[in-house]
Amino acid sequence: DAKTTQPTSMDCAEGRAANLPCNHSTISGNEYVYWYRQIHSQGPQYIIHGLKNNETNEMASLIITEDRKSSTLILPHATLRDTAVYYCIVRAWGETSGSRLTFGEGTQLTVNP
Amino acid sequence: NAGVTQTPKFQVLKTGQSMTLQCAQDMNHNSMYWYRQDPGMGLRLIYYSASEGTTDKGEVPNGYNVSRLNKREFSLRLESAAPSQTSVYFCATKREVITDTQYFGPGTRLTVL
């Protein structure tokens, strides 16, 4: 799997957009970018994934640069409940069932009132 | 639609006792996983099941056994609990073999005295 680099921590004001960056400069052509988050004391939660086009769902938007070496997860209107550790993961298409998810250090996002 | 459920939420055992952690999903996914997460550490895969009737070891299977009872249920058994098995245990499912969109349960917090 390609290595990812994320800032250790970020702060965001409630109601504002939270933009979480991720660098994955060694990403291969068949690797997807996945985002998960883990709210304290809860199970990890899938947010979104993409290959090369920008993606949007009910939780967030994912912007992937044209060269695919970095991406940004956008929470358009952050709430206090979005305070969590956010993980950017790069995984290849065709991974076997037995390959576990590897969460790196992630970014601790704190949404302030 | 409950997603992935786990029971119990909390458990305290004495060394040498046995117990079974239960996991059930209503998402009709084929693949199911058991992870453990220790404080300040990432997820480690204990066992997984690619489909009903099949199970395989992950990276830390010693001291555990699993049973894929049917498509919905995947249980994890500790035959003789040890303090080193104190951890938070997460069950997860995966939508398809070839993606890594995993959906996690809320976790079971196990303490072995």
Image: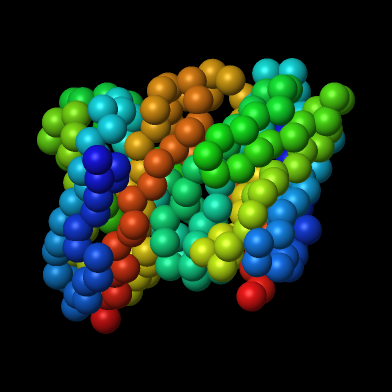
Q: Considering the image in quadrants, where does the N terminus of chain B appear?
A: top left
User: Could one spot residue A28 in this view of the protein?
Assistant: yes
The answer to whether A105 appears left or right of B91 in the picture is: right
Q: Would you place residue A14 above or below residue A89 in this image?
A: below
Residue A81 coordinates in the image, percent (x, y): 52, 64
- Tell me what residue is drawn at x 27 percent, y 75 percent: B112
User: Could one spot residue B66 in this view of the protein?
Assistant: no
Residue B62 coordinates in the image, percent (x, y): 33, 52
Q: Would you place residue B57 above or below residue B30 in this image?
A: below
Q: Which image quadrant is residue B55 in?
A: top left
- Tell me what residue is drawn at x 42 percent, y 46 percent: B45
The answer to whether B40 appears left or right of A65 in the picture is: left
The answer to whether B19 appears left or right of B100 in the picture is: left
Q: Would you place residue B49 above or below residue B43 in this image?
A: above
Residue A49 coordinates in the image, percent (x, y): 60, 32
Taking the view exactly as shown, the residue that stands out farthest to the front is: A15
The answer to whether A52 appears left or right of B50 in the picture is: right
